[in-house]
């Protein structure tokens, strides 16, 4: 596949942004790399590692749009980007922005595609063909006359790609194209990219946080850390450096962690890591059968695998602190609705809500924090009946961590920001500030800085701190990990787990199934405004039929343990952690 | 959320008119509204706007807009009643002259706002910009600025809603009934809104440039916007409307 000539070449490039709080700090630090025509390159790294800067450099936005000091040379199709205009560079490199709403110039899909073609003076006789080909290639020919405002996030993302594609660039650079999408739509976007790469020969450079997707789709992965290129190789090469990645703050696909861990324990001779569930299942099956030398009857059936995590104890007859009974809500106008929501959440529980975009998850959270009122049914939260409690009163009991911290932050200093929620609920100013200072210290946040001068990840920490300081009975998390790197994500989730340990009920809506399976004890599965099922996390994820109906993809480890439980040994059933699988394999292999 | 100035697709004559002719028609109605001085003419022009909206199938969309405009008109009426002191007193400080000027100001306000909104409802923004560039020789960057500004209105109002929701969930009392208190609570929110919109416009500028914005000329547009016979007819109507406005 990767056999073409070099199309983008960076030679010892360094860049630092002008202005801003961290002036002089290098966003890119002596980076050299080249991308060949026809490659599918994934870029990964913790936030602040220079991924977006790298993309801006490849697309010519540096040096032509962003100010700063640039050293070294960047060649795009053999031309130094400093000597070409941004317009000329973009004839070769098409770039899809992180925020697609600001990329759009038109209100109708067709006009969006025409814009670039018209500007670049494409012969009018060829335009029709180009537009329909680009729509075809992205699988959205049926959306041609639709208003962009009425499309779903995944559809919009494909329109953004098609609009760039119509200009026939030789390279596509995409900055986190799936950040706002559910797993199913993310996979569809990547499948589109793969088709463009294979069939049209377009070189793809994509920045992405979802490791499982990257490892499945890309030929080559670049790992960035602190402005430097840390690792560069095929997915198998890169993910065999599991420890190094972890040090950088980059996750590895869970199946790769299984095989790496097996190698570390000496159960497996050094082999490249597995990248898919099938591969890992094959590997484990062979290992277990090979070592015992017997057929499928090796595993004695034991009821209740010892490797499934036991849910944390909770008071059995405790009062639920959130209780929904037959709750319905219909949005006026659009007709979108949720129906018959019935569930309880107990103090100290961590409950995940999973489902596709548009399944009603956000509506459920808004019913819970009082932003919406049910049209029928009864909601009781922390002993308050939601029908007659004002939202501002509920806020003292239910704290919400929103997906985008920038919508929450409105004060001039971090300390004021954290204390704000407390003051609103009537806590005296000096007490509120005292508590806020303690929490800011715990999170290592600078109390007197302006929140907007902090990085995205730190702003999320400020938002989290202002949730923690409230000491609420219920915490609601709406996509708590989106836009965060692995390390920040773990900090957020560990904090939330501590809150649960202290008796707070936590309800989280999250697309990242790995996070859900690591942290949530119980799941609600939603689709089309209804709750399809609820139960213990491993059980729910292992329920293939339920997962299919909700169009939710189970996390890799659960998929692996389900497959192994079917093909190798019943004992794998319900194992949801990498360590669980590894321990069990160890036990089975050394059994006789 | 339904936006007031969203394009409503359709096949009516009004939809098919050249965008420039539609603009001219709206301008003529507005000019006539300013020139006219009788109730019959003012009401007639309003009725014409609504008739056109009904014909294009968007009359229902004008109603939410009226909900915004009517209170504004009432405020205008009250102000006129206070400030116009000539004529015979009717009741308290209200005079006959005050009533007459006040009511005409109300009608003019509606008569000026509605035709423009109607044009935006039956015309795609892209078509409007392209036609202005082609027919009126407006430089593209101005047309683009104008359409982008309009396009950002719903984007920003969604952003504002999201910010308000986040703040409400923290306990800010936006559910207060006191409008002044509400305004006072909303002002601090301008900071997050401003921060996000500056970043957004910058991203838009970059994205447009990367798609050859600076190469665009008057001939670039794939769709052509020639003036047809029906557009000539519409322009004739414009002249007639203004003449009527002067006469009455």
Image: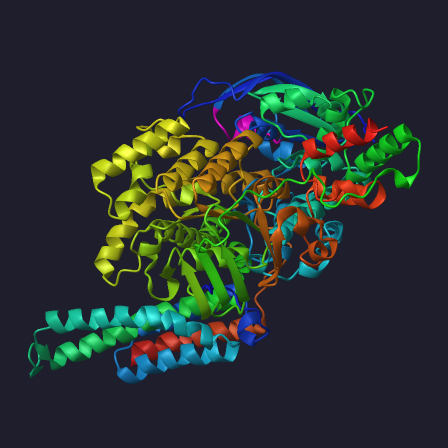
Q: Which residue is drawn at 42% across and 41% down?
A: A406
State whether residue A402 is above or below residue A281.
below
x%, y% of residue A183?
Answer: 66, 47
Front-most of residues B71 and A238: A238
Relative image position of residue A531 (x, y in whole percent): 59, 61
In the displayed structure image, the side of residue A324 where residue B84 appears, left or right: left
- Residue A83 x/y as whole percent: 60, 23
Counting from the top left corner in percent of width and height, residue B183 is at 26, 55
Nearest the viewer among A28 and A47 is: A47
- Can residue A33 be seen from the camera position used here? yes
Where B54 falls versus A45 (above or below)? Answer: below
Give the magenta part as a residue range: A59-67
Q: Quadrant of the C terminus of chain B?
A: bottom left
**Residue A469 shown left or right of residue A289 in the figure:** left
Image side of residue B41 versus residue A70, left or right: left
Residue drawn at point x = 60 percent, y = 21 percent? A247
Q: Which residue is drawn at 71% across and 43% down?
A: A558
In this orientation, which residue lies closer to the viewer: A185 or A167?
A185
């Amino acid at each position: 596949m990767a056999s073409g000539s070099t199309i983008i070449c960076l030679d010892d490039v360094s860049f630092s942004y002008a202005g801003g709080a961290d002036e002089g700090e290098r966003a890119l630090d002596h980076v050299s790399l080249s991308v060949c025509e026809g490659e599918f390159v994934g870029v990964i790294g913790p936030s602040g590692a220079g991924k977006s800067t790298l993309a801006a450099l490849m697309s010519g936005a540096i040096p032509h749009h962003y100010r700063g000091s640039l050293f070294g040379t960047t060649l795009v199709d053999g031309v130094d980007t400093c000597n070409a205009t941004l317009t000329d560079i973009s004839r070769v490199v098409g770039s899809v922005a992180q925020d697609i709403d600001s990329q759009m110039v038109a209100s109708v899909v067709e006009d969006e595609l025409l814009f670039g073609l018209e500007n670049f003076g494409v012969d009018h006789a060829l335009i029709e063909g180009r537009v329909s080909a680009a729509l075809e290639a992205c699988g959205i020919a049926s959306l041609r006359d639709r208003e962009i405002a009425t499309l779903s996030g995944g559809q919009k993302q494909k329109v953004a790609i098609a609009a760039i594609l119509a200009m026939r660039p030789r390279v596509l650079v995409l900055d986190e194209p799936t950040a706002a999408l559910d797993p199913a739509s993310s996979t569809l976007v990547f499948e589109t990219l793969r088709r463009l790469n294979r069939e049209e020969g377009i070189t793809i450079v994509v920045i992405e946080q979802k490791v499982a997707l990257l490892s499945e789709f890309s030929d080559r992965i670049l790992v960035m850390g602190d402005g430097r290129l840390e690792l560069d190789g095929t997915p198998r090469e890169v993910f065999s450096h599991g420890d190094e990645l972890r040090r950088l703050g980059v996750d590895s696909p869970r199946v790769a962690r299984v095989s790496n861990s097996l190698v570390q324990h000496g159960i497996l001779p050094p082999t490249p890591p597995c990248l898919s569930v099938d591969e890992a299942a094959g590997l484990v099956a062979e290992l277990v059968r090979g070592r015992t030398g017997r057929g499928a009857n090796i595993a004695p059936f034991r009821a209740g695998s010892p490797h499934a995590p036991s849910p944390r104890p909770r008071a059995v007859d405790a009062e639920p602190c959130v209780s929904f009974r037959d709750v319905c809500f219909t949005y006026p106008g659009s007709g979108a609705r949720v129906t018959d929501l019935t569930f309880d959440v107990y103090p100290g529980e961590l409950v995940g809500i999973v489902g596709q975009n548009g399944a009603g998850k956000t509506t459920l959270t808004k019913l819970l924090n009082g932003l919406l009122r049910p049209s029928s049914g009864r909601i009781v939260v922390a002993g308050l009946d939601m029908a007659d409690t004002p939202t501002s009163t509920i806020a003292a009991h239910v704290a919400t961590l929103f997906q985008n911290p920038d919508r929450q932050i409105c004060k001039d200093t971090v300390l004021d920001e954290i204390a704000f929620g407390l003051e609103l609920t009537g806590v005296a100013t000096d007490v509120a500030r005292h508590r806020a200072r303690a929490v800011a210290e715990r999170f290592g946040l600078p109390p007197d800085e302006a929140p907007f001068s902090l990085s995205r990840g730190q702003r999320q920490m400020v938002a989290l701190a202002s949730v923690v300081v409230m000491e609420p009975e219920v915490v609601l998390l709406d996509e708590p990990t989106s836009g965060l790197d692995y390390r920040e994500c773990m900090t957020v989730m560990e904090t939330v787990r501590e809150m649960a340990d202290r008796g707070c009920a936590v309800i989280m809506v999250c697309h990242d199934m790995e996070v859900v399976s690591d942290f949530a004890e119980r799941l609600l599965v939603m689709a089309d405004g209804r709750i399809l099922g609820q139960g213990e996390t491993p059980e729910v994820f292992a329920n293939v039929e339920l997962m299919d109906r909700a169009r939710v993809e189970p996390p890799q480890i659960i998929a692996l343990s389900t497959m192994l439980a079917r093909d190798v040994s019943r004992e794998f059933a319900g194992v949801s952690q990498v360590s669980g699988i590894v321990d069990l394999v160890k036990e089975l292999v050394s059994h006789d | 959320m339904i936006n007031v100035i969203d394009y409503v697709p359709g096949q009516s004559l009004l939809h098919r008119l050249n965008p420039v002719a539609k603009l001219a028609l709206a301008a003529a109605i507005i000019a006539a509204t300013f020139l006219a001085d009788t109730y019959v003419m003012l009401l007639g022009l309003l009725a014409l706007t609504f008739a056109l909206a009904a014909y294009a199938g968007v009359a229902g969309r004008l109603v939410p807009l009226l909900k915004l405009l009517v209170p504004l008109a009432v405020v205008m009426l009250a102000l006129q009643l206070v400030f116009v002191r000539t004529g015979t007193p009717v009741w308290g400080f209200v005079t006959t002259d005050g009533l007459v000027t006040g009511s005409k100001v109300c009608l003019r306000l509606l008569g000026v706002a509605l035709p423009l909104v109607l044009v935006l409802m039956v015309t795609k923004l892209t078509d409007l910009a392209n036609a202005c560039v082609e027919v009126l020789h407006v430089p593209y960057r101005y047309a683009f600025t104008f359409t982008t500004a309009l396009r950002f209105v719903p984007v920003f109002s969604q952003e504002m809603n999201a910010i308000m929701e986040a703040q409400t969930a923290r306990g800010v009392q936006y559910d207060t009934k006191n409008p002044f208190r509400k305004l006072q609570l909303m002002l601090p929110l301008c900071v997050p809104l401003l921060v996000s919109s500056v970043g957004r416009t910058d991203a838009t500028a970059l994205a447009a440039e990367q798609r050859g914005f600076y190469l665009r000329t008057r001939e670039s547009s794939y769709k052509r916007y020639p003036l047809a016979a029906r557009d000539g007819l519409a322009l004739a109507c414009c002249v007639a409307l203004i003449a009527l406005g002067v006469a009455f």
